[in-house]
Image (cartoon, rainbow, N blue to C red):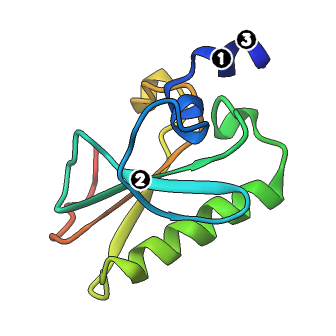
Amino acid sequence: MADESANCIFCKIVRGEIPATMVAENEAAIAFRDLDAKAPVHVLVVPRKHIVSLAHSADPATLGEVLALAGDVARQEGLDGGYRVVINTGPDAGQTVHHLHAHVLGGRNMAWPPG
């Protein structure tokens, strides 16, 4: 895991090596604006520790903190009309960065089904 985290873009953001527009944080996770936004509000919530994906996580406390921070971000961003939290897991789901992250999307109507 240490080798993976050394080159992981999200780990570099967590460590402050790459700048990002921070939105919120808690003890276990950080939230920052996605540079390739798919909605008026598009924030990524990532755990501070390197976890490849949801399929690789066995730590419910960290997962809870990630989701709690996603809710905090939605309230802070004024997404009272609703929002979507998406966790892509693996290549078939479109995961491109191999560090667990939740997308908080809002500020427009969301279509269903999403794929």
Residue 67, percent from left and from top:
60, 65
Check disc 2 and report its element: helix, strand or loop: strand
Residue 38, percent from left and from top:
20, 49
* Mark 1 burial class by Cα count in 10 Å: few <14, some 14-19, many 20+: few
Which residue appears at 47% of the width and 26% of the height?
97
User: What is the spatial separation of the Cα atoms under label 3 and label 2, in whole angstroms?
Assistant: 24 Å
Q: Which residue lies furthest to the top in this view?
A: 3
Toward which corner of the image does residue 76 lie, by quadrant? bottom left
Residue 45, percent from left and from top:
51, 53
Residue 3: mark in rendering = 3
Toward which corner of the image does residue 57 lie, by quadrant? top right
* Mark 3 burial class by Cα count in 10 Å: few <14, some 14-19, many 20+: few
Residue 112, percent from left and from top:
25, 60
* Amino acid residing under circle 2: Phe
- Number of numbered markers: 3
Check disc 1 and report its element: helix, strand or loop: helix
According to the picture, the residue beneath numbered tag 1 turns out to be 6
Q: Nearer the viewer, residue 29 or 57?
A: 29
Q: Nearer the viewer, residue 98 or 82?
A: 98
Give the quarter of the figure containing the N terminus. top right
Residue 76 sits above or below residue 84 on the image: below
**Residues under numbered marks 1 and 3 in contact, where contact means CB atoms less than 8 Å apart:** yes
According to the picture, the residue beneath numbered tag 2 turns out to be 32
User: What is the spatial separation of the Cα atoms under label 1 and label 3, in whole angstroms?
Assistant: 5 Å
Q: Which of 6 and 71 is in front in this view?
A: 6
Residue 4 sits above or below residue 115 on the image: above
* Amino acid residing under circle 1: Ala
In primary-sequence order, the first of circles 1 and 2 is 1
In primary-sequence order, the first of circles 3 and 2 is 3
* Amino acid residing under circle 3: Asp
Residue 68 located left or right of residue 96: right
Which residue appears at 26% of the width and 86% of the height?
81
